[in-house]
Image (cartoon, rainbow, N blue to C red):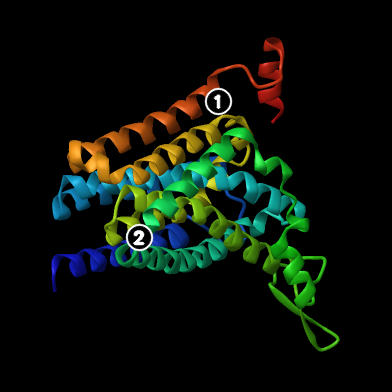
Amino acid sequence: MNIDQISYLIFALVLLLALFFDLGLMSKKEQTVSIRQALKQTFFWVGLALAFFVFVWVEKGHQSALEYLSAYLMEWSLSIDNIFVFILIFSAFAVKEKNYGRVLLIGILMAIVFRIIFITVGVVLVEKFHLILYVFGVFLVYTGLSMLKANEHEEFNPQESKVYLFLKRFLPLAPHDGGGKFMIRENGKPVYTTLFVVIIMLASIDLIFALDSIPAVIGISRDRFVIYTSNIFAVLGLRSLFFLLRGAVSKFDYLQQGIAIVLVFIGIKMLGEHWINQWMPKQIQVAVSLGVIAVCISGSIFYSLFIQKKGLPADQVDDSILNQ
């Protein structure tokens, strides 16, 4: 076995053990997840991702490790952005809190499978048609500029989305959760519950976000191992992050702007890669990318949490936070 095969094997084993630990020891079926438990699970997944960063450094060198960390931070920040939409979906379909964990887990695992397919296709396209990097670059710049100008989350209505309308058109849907089941039988025929609909929507929404994040990660690294592992670690941590931030995610007013700046930066970097490579070593490029991502994401979160809320007088800020 070569070093890449060994690395994939170790990653798979770590992932299986982590899922067993998280689901078997830290989570209980149909139990409401407290903030304290969500914090422990979040620390667990972030700590595991950072420990894997050390493993990548030892096995594949500092450049691959920094690329992995940059990609992970990019995906992790986009995961926070996902949570706002997830909250809207759960609210729109009146999902009971005791079903949150199970629905999120299945939706996220489906999203991981689809992401692996997307990543594989994207990397193959880049390897065979190098010019597609410029297409990705233009797309990221356009997406980033669009995010700077508008907040699409506020306009999103899950029950008017194309995914829901498609399901409603082709499947018999029940207007309830079927007592926690995904499918029930009515008059001898299968009927799909709101929990089934929510799972499909979670996976679909994550794929929509992946259209931004996967080109961005490819802009950071061409190493499939780095892209796969950073994506999977970030997405698997999304479930605990949801429970941790669902009451506070509305406070991150400027996170989207931070993400938008990062997308524009990576898009411009992809467009100018040929010229950048001529005057800047790859190692320095990786370090600069990591610095820009870290500063933009942490800066936007800090700015959101510690400045006056948009549209509120200063004396109403504290009351607004307390009421959320």
Give the side of residue 65 with respect to residue 197, left or right: left
Residue 57 position in % (x across, y down): 18, 48
Give the mark nearest the N terminus, 2 or 1: 2
Q: Residue at x 76, y 53 (%)?
A: 92
Q: Front-most of 298 and 149?
A: 149
In the displayed structure, 14 sits above or below 187; it is above
Residue, disc 2: 228
Residue, disc 1: 304
Badge 2 marks a residue whose secondary structure is helix
Using a 10 Å C-alpha cutoff, classify the residue at mark 2 as few (fewer than 14 neighbours), some (14 to 19) or many (20 or more): many
- Res. 317 mark: none
Mark 2: amino acid:
Tyr
Give the side of residue 156 with respect to residue 268, left or right: right
Residue 278 position in % (x across, y down): 19, 41
Give the side of residue 89 with respect to residue 230, left or right: right
Mark 1: amino acid:
Ser
Q: Quadrant of the C terminus?
A: top right
User: Residue 289: in sight, yes or no?
Assistant: yes
Q: Front-most of 23 and 84?
A: 84
In this rendering, the count of numbered labels is: 2
Q: Residue at x 29, y 66 (%)?
A: 13
